[in-house]
Image (tube, rainbow, N blue to C red):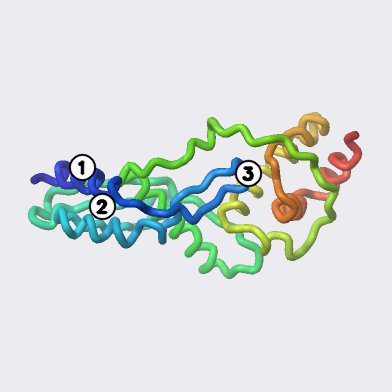
Amino acid sequence: MNVYQKLNAARAEFHTQKLNKSGHNKFAGYKYFELADFIVPALQIFEEVGLTSVIQFGSDVATMTIVNTEKPDEQIIVTSPMSEANLKGCHPVQNLGAVQTYIRRYLWVAALEIVEHDAVDSSPAVKEVKRIAPNDNARELVSAEDLVYLEELSVQVTEQCSVDPVAAKQMVKEQNLDNDQMQALWSYLDATTRRKLKEVK
């Protein structure tokens, strides 16, 4: 088989596996595969069909090269843009490790056509915003993936709040955040934005 046939065979075999999703997105209420949930069976299947993979990280793009072990010149390359993490209390190298773990997961998801929840179509329930003061330890209470989302959300909320605080507060309500997530979000917002949100009735 050529490299494309082998990859299709690997995908077909992978999707016969019964794997548990340990990741949990609290915003939209769905579970997803973390890297540890599928990496071992994926590697075993690759070995069975005669494939191997090499992942490399560049400054802008990460690549996963899938190689036909019987004909190494036959290769398929999967790419993903690089990102960054800013986890509170972590050294730069720890943030780098978090990014690489996420990117590895996304490359494998693309390579094996792993089906994930479509967050774009998700419609989380509305939940009342709690008035919570910033907490220096707030970001330590939520997952790294949640922190990435919350930091991006804080930028959108801040921009919206400068124009329309009512709409900004509604934006936060629609995320259906739990107490820990709300504290973490609050820690990303500046004092002016927090004050405007609190003033909204």
Horizontal and vertical percent position of residue 64: 30, 52
Residue type at mark 3? Phe
In this view of the protein, which residue sits in the foreground, 89 or 174? 174
Q: In the drawing, does residue 36 fall left or right of residue 48? A: right
Task: State the image coordinates of residue 184 (x, y, percent, origin top left).
Answer: 72, 55
Looking at the image, which residue is at 88% across and 42% down? 198
Q: Nearer the viewer, mark 1 or mark 2?
A: 1
Mark 2 element type:
strand
Closer to the camera, 180 or 12? 12
Residue type at tag 2:
Thr
Q: Count of labels shown? A: 3
At a point 61% along the width and 61% down the height, the residue shown is 87
What is the C-alpha distance between the residues marked 3 and 2? 33 Å
Sequence-wise, the earlier of marks 1 and 3 is: 1
Q: Which mark is residue 65?
A: 2
Point out the tag, 3 or 2, that comes first from the N-terminus.
Answer: 3
Query: Which of the 4 quarters of the picture holds residue 187?
Result: bottom right
CB atoms of marks 1 and 2 within 8 Å: no
**Badge 3: residue crowd in 10 Å (few <14, some 14–19, many ≥20):** some
Q: Is residue 22 left or right of residue 68?
A: right
Q: Are marks 1 and 3 in contact (CB under 8 Å)?
A: no
Could you tell me residue 109's position as x and y percent? 37, 47
